[in-house]
Image: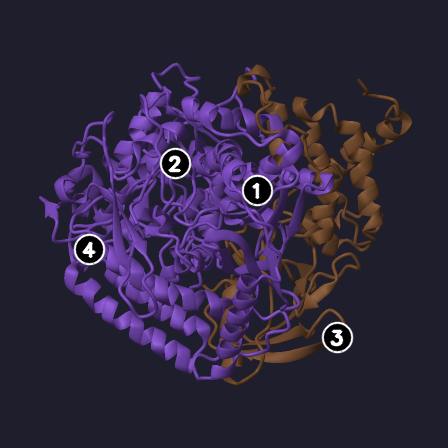
Chain colours: A brown, B purple
Amino acid sequence: MNLTLRVWRQAGPAAAGAMREYRAEGISPDMSFLEMLDVVNEGLIAKGDEPIAFDHDCREGICGMCGMMINGAAHGPQRLTTACQLHMRSFSDGETITIEPWRATAFPVLKDLVVDRSAFDRIIQAGGFISAPTGSAVDGNAIPIPKLDADDAMDAAACIGCGACVAACPNASASLFTAAKISHLGSLPQGQPERSRRALAMVAQMDLESFGGCSLFGECMEACPKGISIDTINTMHRDFLFASATKRDVKEWSGGA
Amino acid sequence: MTLDAKIPSGPVAEKWEKHKFEMKLVNPANKRKYHVIVVGSGLAGASAAATMSELGYQVSCFCYQDSPRRAHSIAAQGGINAAKNYRNDGDSVWRLFYDTVKGGDFRAREANVYRLAQVSVDIIDQCVAQGVPFAREYGGLLANRSFGGAQVSRTFYARGQTGQQLLIGAYQALEKEIAAGGVKMYSRHEMVELVLVNGVARGVIVRDMVTGEIQSHAADAVVLATGGYGNVFYLSTNAKGCNVTATYRAHKKGAFFANPCYTQIHPTCIPVKGDYQSKLTLMSESLRNDGRVWVPKRKEDCAKAPGDIPEQDRDYYLERKYPSFGNLSPRDIASRAAKEACDDGRGVGPGGLGVYLDFADAIKRLGAKAIEERYGNLFEMYERITDENPYKVPMRIYPAVHYTMGGLWVDYNLQSTIPGLHVIGEANFSDHGANRLGASALMQGLADGYFILPYTIGNYLAQAKLEKVTTEHAEFVAAREAVAQRTTRLLNIKGTRTVDSFHRELGKIMWDKCGMARDRAGLEWAIKRIPELRAEFWENVNVPGSASELNQSLEKAGRVADFLEFGELMCRDALHREESCGGHFRTEYQEEGEAKRNDDAFAYVAAWEFAGEGKAPTLHKEALEFENVHLATRSYK
């Protein structure tokens, strides 16, 4: 296959970027999308040009490191598929492919297709955990968990934190990401003591990071390579409302001996 | 220097309890005065960093990815072993210990393996408490499956994403501690040098991968949790960024490298398609529960469609050679048998490097629906990559490099031969011997990070009597200088070959000569050829861009430069070990086609000391004593 690529090139965080055109020639339909970029990069280096920078690591669709807009769609045209698992047989010979980084204020571009997603880590820091210091656990079978609850938790926990939901959202909202974590931990008995605090803190952090609000367009769910359901956002809204209505302050005088 | 593993005295079952009591403690109020560096944020690194912070230590944690949640532990599919005996099927700490020592082909240290089996049960409890969504039965209790040919069901799992869920659990604990101020996290920072002051590990030099800044970080102890070195083969199931740099840099500063030739080749991966191939994808071993492995009996049939080859013309070679284990034979054995079939000219698919894994019988027996329930996600993944439907045509699989059992030598306290330098998870050598059993990697990473290192590092710090060191110390200045020089040198070569082309060539040498089957002539050739390739690299590599920006070519160049030295060390280790054991198969040492161990001469850990540039490394031996599991030949016939 021979293709034309239109790629966003940007030298650094403060530099101005622009679309540039490259030829990708002799591409096999069995190549993954990232392998196609590898081939283009080898050609660029040989010509004394700078290769296109893009994030990637496991190349098997689980680490969440890769991600780019391919013809305007997060991770490209195939549903439930990360860019690294997308194969060139999804495209046709002679096609022009447009490749851009995730577009969101909260994900500033570092170089070419590489963006800074550390805002996601800070949302988790705000409350996306269960406080269970090492050594304090009871026996794993001491807390029976109905299978359906465990399955719900697992469905939400499948999120790989790639950021496609943000990139696909017209508001650049991180609601699906945040809601997936709130739903995962809130589906489990171990997650109950911190459930209200978690919802308040994570939603507040999401707002602080300049992500947009959710208006339930549903683009996030379409773009999510792991099929995280938009129902999780309902759970998040419910938890947030309940927590706001029942908020209790920490008592200043607690402790002392 | 004599290697002292510092194994506590007493019966194996009591060593850890006794040692925990005898170890020195750091006073709770003093813990915050100690600063520990953790490099790597996978299962071992994240769990260790979070746990040490909970104890009160100040921790700095580094990873090369954009977030600690990306570490390659995330890709483990199958599960995690623990001797819970929830199935009442005869499992016990002792049995898990026994299976691991035997599975490792008697090349692991008994005391470490026993401790691993002991703490395995605590890991499951800890992960459940964190909210890891393990599979559950309808009654609400934890589900188990049998895995990797084990005769008990001791494997806990979260669908086909166990590694992901365990890592997310550890990552969340880590983020909790970052928020609490106990851990300072440095993502997109790569360790490029270890710093020793008076022979003691006191810090690291890292490169900020966004700005290119070379930074120094000083501490009271350094922990490497940087994973394995499978990418020395270029093609492996490891993530693209996995590398040997941290452990190899430490090796050059005095840490002994143990058993580097022990690599695990996983039998069920998707075969290579073309020269552009960038990595290999694993298909879970669980597929062998229902799939039957075969190749055509005759070479002439290899080009035919599998459906056109009648039953009587197929060779179900695992069932034929190993009737009692059949398609469930252990990883090393199944991998070698596939290679033999392909070497015999009976491989299928492009280049003849593949064997069939056929589900037709299972679909006939159980129905396509049942197979979809068991393996639906794997079948989808296979189809996405190969464009073939495994419900209709048999899968094609081939072995691929998956895990490395070798690593930096550590004593019972997980400390390397450099005082203050601790090594945990896949990066150390200690628990799997010459072959790792399925679902044991996750167990070891978390055992080291949650339950072992946080104790032993306290024992070290309580006794270390460390002077105050800042990053202006001459050793830090010299290390920074060395890093800057190396970087400049790489950028100034401006040759004609890309970094990847060198990496591919090295990978091919390693795979051909130090892969599934090794022999003297091949290894000697590789030991001669690798230095030539290395010399060409330093004369002819082309690294574009500059040092003061995000430069992925420069990152790769530094890693490949280390692989080009490390590959030679691996071959030397493989050459010296004149026996076959576990993942190390020397064609000269076999009996009726099976690996032949030589316990009289080689029941030891080979720990290599760096002797200087261009010099052959020095071999040190730690004798292995088997007081509890008696040396025996593994047989799966």
Label number found at residue B412: 2
Determine whether the residue tagged by mark 3 lies in a helix, strand or loop.
loop
Three-letter code for the amino acid on which mark 4 is drawn:
His
Q: CA distance from mark 1 to mark 3?
A: 34 Å
* B467 to A154, vertically: above or below: below
Q: Is residue B16 left or right of residue B357?
A: right
- Mark earlier in primary sequence (2, 1): 1
- Badge 4 vs badge 3, beta-carbon distance below 8 Å: no
Quadrant holding the C terminus of chain B: top left
Q: CA distance from mark 4 to mark 3?
A: 54 Å
Q: CA distance from mark 1 to mark 4?
A: 36 Å
From the viewer's side, name the closer residue of A30 and A236.
Answer: A236
- Badge 2 vs badge 4, beta-carbon distance below 8 Å: no
Task: Chain letter for mark 3, please.
Answer: A
Q: CA distance from mark 2 to mark 1?
A: 21 Å
Determine whether the residue tagged by mark 4 lies in a helix, strand or loop.
helix
Judge depth for marks 2 and 1 and give the one in front. Answer: 2
Query: Could you say where residue B25 lies in the image, as x and y percent from the top left?
Result: 54, 29
* A182 to B543, vertically: above or below: above
From the viewer's side, name the closer residue of B117 and B506.
Answer: B117
Snapshot quadrant of residue B560: bottom left
Query: Could you say where residue B180 lies in the image, as x and y percent from the top left?
Result: 72, 38
Three-letter code for the amino acid on which mark 3 is drawn:
Ala
Res A86 seen here: no
Which residue lies under the disc numbered 1? B46
* B287 to B610, vertically: above or below: above
Please determine if labels 3 and 2 lie on a single subunit: no
Which residue lies under the disc numbered 3? A15
Judge depth for marks 1 and 4 and give the one in front. Answer: 4
Q: Say which residue appears at 88% left-offset and 23% top-offset.
A: A251
- Mark earlier in primary sequence (1, 4): 1
